[in-house]
Image (spheres, rainbow, N blue to C red):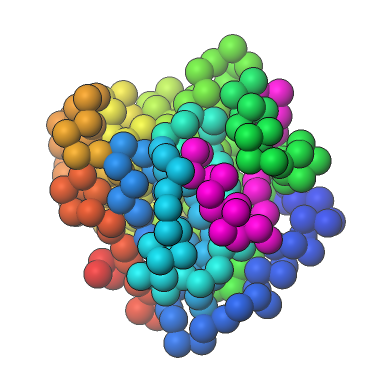
Amino acid sequence: MTRKVFLPVAALAVVGGLIYGTQEPDSPPKAVFLDVGQGDCTAITWRGEAILIDTGPTVARGWRRLLKRYGIRTVRAIFLTHPDRDHITGTGSLLREYPSAELYVRDAFRVHGEMAAYLREWGVGLTDVKWISAEGTREWGPWRLEFWLPEAPDSSPDNDRSLVISARIRDRSVWISGDLGISGEMRLLGRVASVGPAQIVKAGHHGSASSLSSQWLEALRPEFVVFSSGRENPYGHPHPAPIRRAEAVNATVYRTDRDGTVWFTWDGERFRPR
């Protein structure tokens, strides 16, 4: 199957510019799953720059100080998987700290009332957003980013339409799927199974009982599974069932509620937990 590149020409120039921004040649690529409480914020990095996937549940203070711990000096792009507040409400403060960061959102949420309200709050116009309307791939330094759009009716919950991103270096990949549940995983399963095993998978929907199916795990065969959830959260995340499913494929489990921020560093051949 030929995959489309979703980015228009103007956006290609922006993403291409990621390669030539602020660079720290001695800083290896990392995948960082930030401890933001009951929410999601993942950074993939290269030479001191980062692409953020979701921005956590609150307006964080001191983003520069926080990101600097992991060798990040510049945020070049922010991808929002879906409009839930525990995934996107850190965006306003991030854009104030890094005003040149480009904002990417799935086109399915262009007319979403809550997304529109957040954009107004952040001072971002609809034409300022890079709307993702088709699946595609993009190169960024050593990373190859792939964007997957689960198909679901417009009346479906936002979780079912979460943008899914796989970030790959050579034959090792990191998968981030927002709040995608098992029904959404099933819609992508046939296509995902053809791309080969992952190394790291972030559990969808913070590890709820209805996420991280055995079929999804069998298709991706991760070495590591990361659960992003808050300590003593009222939802009981992560649920024991997806943890058991991860362990059944011999994946090592990390949890931000227990382990704090979890990060992996590229050693030239694979990602290693730090």
Q: Is residue 240 above or below residue 105?
A: above
Judged from this view, the residue extending furthest toward the bottom is 26
Residue 57, horizontal then vertical, whole percent = 41, 38
Residue at 81 percent across and 51 percent down: it is 8
Q: Would you say 208 lies left or right of 252 here?
A: right
Question: Residue 231, position in %: x, y?
Answer: 19, 39
Magenta region includes residue 101: yes
Is 144 included in the stretch rendered in magenta?
Answer: no
Based on the displayed image, in which of its 4 quarters is residue 236 positioned?
Answer: top left
Query: At which x and y percent is residue 101?
Result: 64, 58
* Left or right for 274, reference 7: left
Q: Quadrant of the C terminus?
A: bottom left
Q: Which residues are magenta?
A: 88-112
Q: Nearer the viewer, residue 182 or 236?
A: 236
Q: Residue at x 79, y 64 (%)?
A: 13
Front in this rendered view, residue 234 or 177? 234
Task: State the residue at coordinates (31%, 63%).
Answer: 263
